Amino acid sequence: MLVFVLRYAATVSIFVFCLFSFSYALTKDWSFIPAVYGTRLLLPDLTPNVGLWWYFFIEMFDSFRSFFLGVFWLHMTAYSPGITIRLYRQPLAAVVLLYGIVTIFQPYANIGDAGAWMALLTLYGHVFERRLSACCAYNPWLISAVTRYTFPALSSLLYSTLLGPAFYYLWIYAGSGNANFFYAITLVWSLGLVVILADMLYAILRDEWEVERPEMKGREARQI
């Protein structure tokens, strides 16, 4: 495990150093570091978006801003050790799940990142197909066994996709709404993404468990 961590930490460090060196060679200035990375770390722009940060920091007193910036970043990075340690034998799965966490909890969230992450989920289409075929063979009336909360997830995403632009228009242009309407619908959007992320993690772990114990394929399992 230690060799694995050191190897990939060194690889990431080398790539970051090369990217920084190329950026400096093109711009002849280090100002791109605070402009690109400092903007995301310090959150100077509180323009409304589909993320979870902007409304919270608008309502916050300036004296608590630094503390809660650290708390928000600590919350997002806290998922990394558990996922990478648990899925170290499946690095691609760990990357996809961590990208989903970044998509949901990043400071400047947007629809494009969510679409890119959902496209990455197709890399594990074989997991969905195998789990679905195995479970349907065991229970032919079971339509979707791999995603336990399909209906709430799709409903949340569809609901927020339709009402999000409407609430934004009412708040910004029509003046008949307020920030609470738009932020509430962004919470629903994030909820749908979290449900999809949880189902993805469940499908990967279930598939790994069935590979280790083939006799349990298609059978219901309960965690005690």
Image (spheres, rainbow, N blue to C red):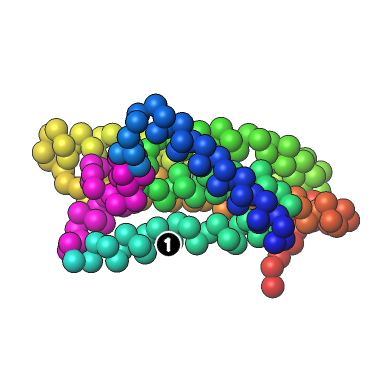
Q: Position of residue 198 (x, y in %)?
A: 57, 53
Question: Image quadrant of residue 219?
Answer: bottom right
Rendered residue at 50%/33% (across/down) = 116
Measured as percent of width and height from the top left, residue 86 is found at 67, 59
Q: In the shown orientation, is residue 58 left or right of residue 160?
A: left
Closer to us: 123 or 94:
94
Q: What amino acid does circle 1 point to?
A: Leu
Seen at 20% across and 48% down, the residue is: 179
Based on the displayed image, in which of its 4 quarters is residue 35 positioned? top left
Residue 108, compared with residue 6, is above or below; it is above
| Residue 9 seen by the camera | yes
Image quarter of the N terminus: bottom right
The C terminus, quarter of image: bottom right
Mark 1 Cα-neighbour bin, 10 Å: few <14, some 14–19, many ≥20: few
- Extreme residue toward the top, this view: 26
Q: Residue furthest bottom?
A: 224
Give the magenta-colored segment's residue range.
34-62
Vertical placement of residue 9 versus 140, above or below: below
Spot occupied by residue 155 in the image (x, y as percentages of width and height): 46, 42
In percent of the image, x 72 and y 57: which residue is there? 3
Rendered residue at 49%/50% (across/down):
101
| Residue 107 x/y as whole percent | 35, 48
Q: Return the residue at label 1.
A: 74
| Numbered marks: total | 1
**Left or right: where 214 falls relative to 37:** right
Seen in the picture, residue 75 relative to 183 is either above or below; the reply is below
Kindly tell me whether residue 164 is visible in this rendering: no
Q: Nearer the viewer, residue 89 or 19?
A: 19
Is residue 157 magenta-colored?
no
